[in-house]
Amino acid sequence: MQQALIGRSRVLGAIVVAVALATGAYAFTASNTVPGSSAGSGSGTISGYTVSNVQYQLNATTPSDIDSVTFTLSAPATQARAKVVAGATPYTTCSIASGVSVTCNFSPDIAVASADELTVIATS
């Protein structure tokens, strides 16, 4: 009889432990929260800029060199780069006033004789 009581106690103890573990695991997972999030895909048109009012400023000491170029963009931009020699690298970083008025200072200056193409890259 004592053996049966000990066996039942062990089974009952095992059941109590299993229930306690299951309840603890449930309580832990029940406290998790997941914030909302977003995911998506889209597209938009990429249009170019029209460059106008191009003006080259010559070096005051060596007028056969281009010091800088200024121009106006058709829409506001936040970044602009330019070069005046085809195939040359790198582009010169330009400053932008009012989103559309661009000034590119060349350093070193560019020889007028080598200037053969104004290339502009701009982004908003």
Image (spheres, rainbow, N blue to C red):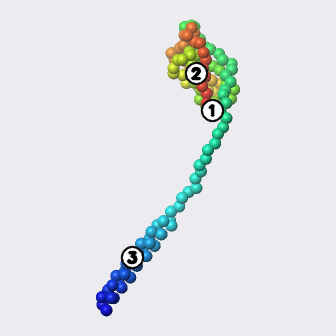
Whether residue 104 is visible, yes or no, is no
Q: Quadrant of residue 120?
A: top right
> What is the crowding at mark 3: few (fewer than 14 residues within 10 Å), some, or many (at least 20)?
few
Q: Nearer the viewer, mark 3 or mark 2?
A: 3
Q: Secondary structure at mark 1?
A: loop
Residue type, label 3: Val
Q: CA distance from mark 3 to mark 1?
A: 64 Å
Whether residue 112 is visible, yes or no, is yes
Residue type, label 2: Ala
Disc 1: which residue: 124
Quadrant housing the N terminus: bottom left
Q: Secondary structure at mark 3?
A: helix
Question: 61 or 79, which is in the foreground?
Answer: 79
Residue at image point 63% right, 27% down: 97
First-in-chain label (3 vs 2): 3
Q: Secondary structure at mark 2?
A: strand
- Disc assigned to residue 82: 2
Disc 3: which residue: 17
First-in-chain label (2 vs 1): 2
Is 27 placed above or below 108 here?
below
Residue type, label 1: Ser
Total marks in image: 3
Q: Position of residue 112 (x, y in %)?
A: 57, 9
Q: Nearer the viewer, mark 3 or mark 1?
A: 3
The answer to whether the residues at label 3 and label 1 have Cβ atoms under 8 Å apart is no
Q: Position of residue 14 (x, y in %)?
A: 37, 78
Quadrant housing the C terminus: top right
Residue at image point 50% right, 62% down: 32
Residue at image point 47% right, 69% down: 26
> What is the crowding at mark 1: few (fewer than 14 residues within 10 Å), some, or many (at least 20)?
few
